[in-house]
Image (tube, coloured by chain):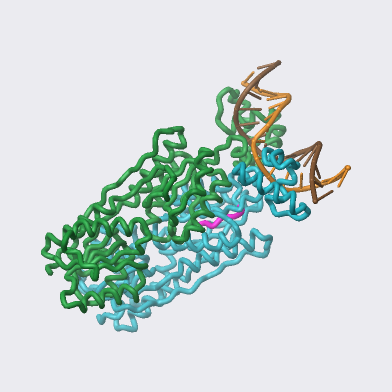
Chain colours: A green, B cyan, C brown, D orange
Amino acid sequence: MKDVASAAGVALKTVSRVVNGEPGVHPTTAERVRQAIESLGYSRNESARVLRQGRTATIGLVIEDVADPFYSGLNRAVEDVAITHGCLVLSGSSAEEPARERELVLTFCSRRVDGLIVVPAGDDHTYLRSELDAGTPAIFVDRPPGPGIDVDTVLSDNAGGAAAAVGHLLAHGHRRIAFLGDCPSIYTAAERLTGYRAAMGGLIDDRLVAMAAPELVRVRADLDRMLALPDPPTAVFTGNGRLTVTALRALGGRRLALVGFDDFELADLLTPGVTVIAQDPIGLGRVATELLFRRIGGDHGPSEQIQLPVRLIARGSGELPP
Amino acid sequence: MKDVASAAGVALKTVSRVVNGEPGVHPTTAERVRQAIESLGYSRNESARVLRQGRTATIGLVIEDVADPFYSGLNRAVEDVAITHGCLVLSGSSAEEPARERELVLTFCSRRVDGLIVVPAGDDHTYLRSELDAGTPAIFVDRPPGPGIDVDTVLSDNAGGAAAAVGHLLAHGHRRIAFLGDCPSIYTAAERLTGYRAAMGGLIDDRLVAMAAPELVRVRADLDRMLALPDPPTAVFTGNGRLTVTALRALGGRRLALVGFDDFELADLLTPGVTVIAQDPIGLGRVATELLFRRIGGDHGPSEQIQLPVRLIARGSGELPP
DNA sequence: GTGAAAGCGCTAACAT
DNA sequence: ATGTTAGCGCTTTCAC
């Protein structure tokens, strides 16, 4: 910038004004400066600007896995909103490991991101306390923070969606409805179990409930065990997208009514089409990011807990008779 | 840092030494400094460090869409390699728009990223010349740069894969093989057309070749037109993952042998399973990022053009008889 | 083993 | 309309 200034025969500040489009520069001078910038191939050093202004024009996004279709859709929505605010997105995958989540968040903070969007992997977020106090806004998405941390939260209606799934199967005549959920330590899995239980009421049979990581071997064993019961399930509710796919593989040809939590591409092309409770990952990302920019903009109102609706999409598998 | 120094009763520089783990600090002093850091909740300002050192420990990644399964897999691979080098990843979606690609790249450059990984949307990359000259390494992935730009490139064997797909269908007795490709202006689409033509040899019939964006209405019209010919195709080769899925939807129940470029989740669960030419998005990302870090590390050897193999996965749809 | 001073490239505040 | 000065928080250099 100094070189540009001397090349254009003006002071540093004038170059700064031109670069930032600030008013109060004579058009002729401005043009001269622009020429100098062009011929020297100058481009402003954002790091220095950041250091001075305190704003990085960057937000940090921690998700479970940037390659997961659910989270990558959310990622895209975050990016699209960020770009309208002139912000870039630093993203990282926690891989469902609390330590990695923490490390990513703290790294983002040391880079002085303007705000954070976090899909938490762990349930202890006390490490965030000092950053929040220091004024870095954070929004939790998909899952709430651990106890004692008061931040904005954007969640899907997990329990309601699960209840709707079960209600749909009940309405189609099923009474023996199994639930395959993810590890109960994961918030969403626990919520969906709650919704399942509420909707099943007195029909609950614990032998029809299995909760663990979505591994093919494990899911196949669970299904085999349930189907070998004297009164086997006639329908199954799977607790997330990966479990749905794993269960379909495990079922092989066996036809069982099925409703899955989470929509996925090609659900309509399978035979039968897969009935799902569709979350709105793009909506989650968009709402969270808009809220984040309100906070960055200085909105210090009480923390908000937003819940987004889910919707049932009937495609055939959930309408099979018992 | 100043506060920490005075709290610990030492000079600024000593705090810096402790923070950076530099040698030459008395253990007792170091401990006192660490206590001060702890109690003040201090964390180093990376922006200032960057300003001073010139390294941002950040790389920029421009892909078509962070939400696309192919590119999000690549994104994850880039992240995983970057993290082993202590780097974070700024990612952005070009949405297949050259202007957006350019803007993202230049924004990343003005933030002084240590390196760039680009899936180009446009074919004019002269705007990168000055950045490359300034020493910012860039790796192009999936598609090569426009003319006159000499950078490292990591591509899949598009033509070879397409030829293998057609060869597979020929081996199963097909002679009337259609090709549904993406816009021919996209490098990969053009390469795959080349491979298709080479493998078809004298069997080429231009009425069986259609290239345009993967929209359901258009793909359905193309297929309908081809299937209404006096000698309709008995097989189709689709030029990318989205076209494969769109073609499957457009075909509805009609059984036609099919091989698709790009693997996708659930390809094995459809009936019949979908035979594909599988690219290795994770390999592309990993190889590109490893090469990038070699460049960042000071390797100024001649630019490399790397081609990754693809492999055919037979699942049923490509083995249907004519 | 420790510290003082200079300066990275920029912008904010205050001249002129 | 333009220029001057100070300083963002850190690392580098060199002195103690």
Count of labels in the image: 0
Q: Residue B33, how many percent across, how many down? A: 69, 47
- B295 in the magenta segment: no
Q: Nearer the viewer, residue A188 or B230?
A: A188
Residue A223 appears left or right of A91: left
- The image quadrant of residue B287 is bottom right
Residue A243 appears left or right of B293: left
Q: Height in image: A206 above or below B52?
A: below
The quadrant the C terminus of chain B occupies is bottom left
Residue A256 appears left or right of A130: left
Q: Nearer the viewer, residue A265 or D1?
A: A265
Q: Nearer the viewer, residue A314 or A233?
A: A233
Q: Residue B136, how many percent across, how many down? A: 63, 53
Q: Height in image: A228 above or below B75?
A: below
Q: Height in image: B55 above or below A179?
A: above
Residue A110 appears left or right of A115: right
Q: Residue A243, how many percent across, how many down? A: 31, 66
Is residue B225 in sight in this rendering? no
Q: Specify the segment rendered in magenta.
A: B114-119
The quadrant the N terminus of chain B occupies is top right
Q: Nearer the viewer, residue A291 or B296?
A: A291
Q: Residue at x 12, y 68 (%)?
A: A321
Q: Residue at x 36, y 73 (%)?
A: B276
Q: Residue at x 50, y 41 (%)?
A: A132
Q: What's the magenta bit mostly, secondary-structure-wise?
A: strand
Q: Residue A67, how many percent across, how many down? A: 42, 61
Is residue B133 in sight in this rendering? yes
- B118 in the magenta segment: yes
- The image quadrant of residue A24 is top right
